């Protein structure tokens, strides 16, 4: 999932950009990776074979806040991959 931030020079960049895992039976999602203009984070680091419950909780919390904000702003998302959420026409 990405939100494309329009830059002054006209180029849109994904900020933030996340990889999410969808749990169909539980009807929920979980963040696996996150990146923005400040850096990136992973829930699981394959190089170290390490899982970070703290990173998972923080990233899932961010995703919940972000989606809640998008819904509150009455935005409509049409794609699961590389989501671009333009404002609805009034």
Image (cartoon, rainbow, N blue to C red):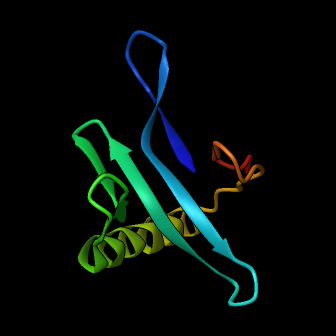
Q: Nearer the viewer, residue 66 or 42?
A: 42
Q: Is residue 3 above or below residue 50?
A: above
Residue 28: x percent and y percent? 63, 81
Q: Is residue 46 visible?
A: yes
Label tally: 0
On the picture, is 49 further left or further right than 32? left
Q: Is 39 displayed left or right of 61 in the figure? A: left
Judge whether 53 appears above or below 48 on screen. below
User: In the image shown, does 61 or 47 lie closer to the viewer?
Assistant: 47
Which residue is depicted at the point 33% across and 42% down? 36
- Farthest residue toward the top? 9
The location of residue 34, given as percent across then percent down, is: 39, 52
Q: Is residue 78 left or right of residue 39?
A: right
The percent coordinates of residue 1 (x first, y second) are 57, 51
Identify the residue shown where x is 78% and y is 51%: 78
Left or right: where 69 falls relative to 80: left
Q: Residue at left 75%, top 80%?
A: 24
Q: Does residue 86 show up?
A: no
Percent across and percent down for residue 73 are: 55, 61
Q: Where is 53 relative to 21, above or below?
A: below
Quarter of the image where one finds residue 70: bottom right
């Amino acid at each position: 999932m990405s939100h494309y931030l329009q830059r002054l020079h006209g180029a849109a960049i994904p900020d933030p950009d996340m990889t999410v895992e969808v749990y169909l039976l539980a009807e929920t999602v979980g963040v696996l990776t996150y990146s923005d203009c400040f850096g990136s984070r992973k829930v699981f680091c394959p190089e170290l074979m390490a899982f970070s419950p703290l990173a998972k909780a923080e990233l899932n919390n961010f995703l919940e806040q972000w989606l809640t904000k998008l819904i509150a702003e009455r935005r409509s998302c049409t794609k699961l991959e590389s989501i671009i959420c333009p404002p609805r026409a009034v």
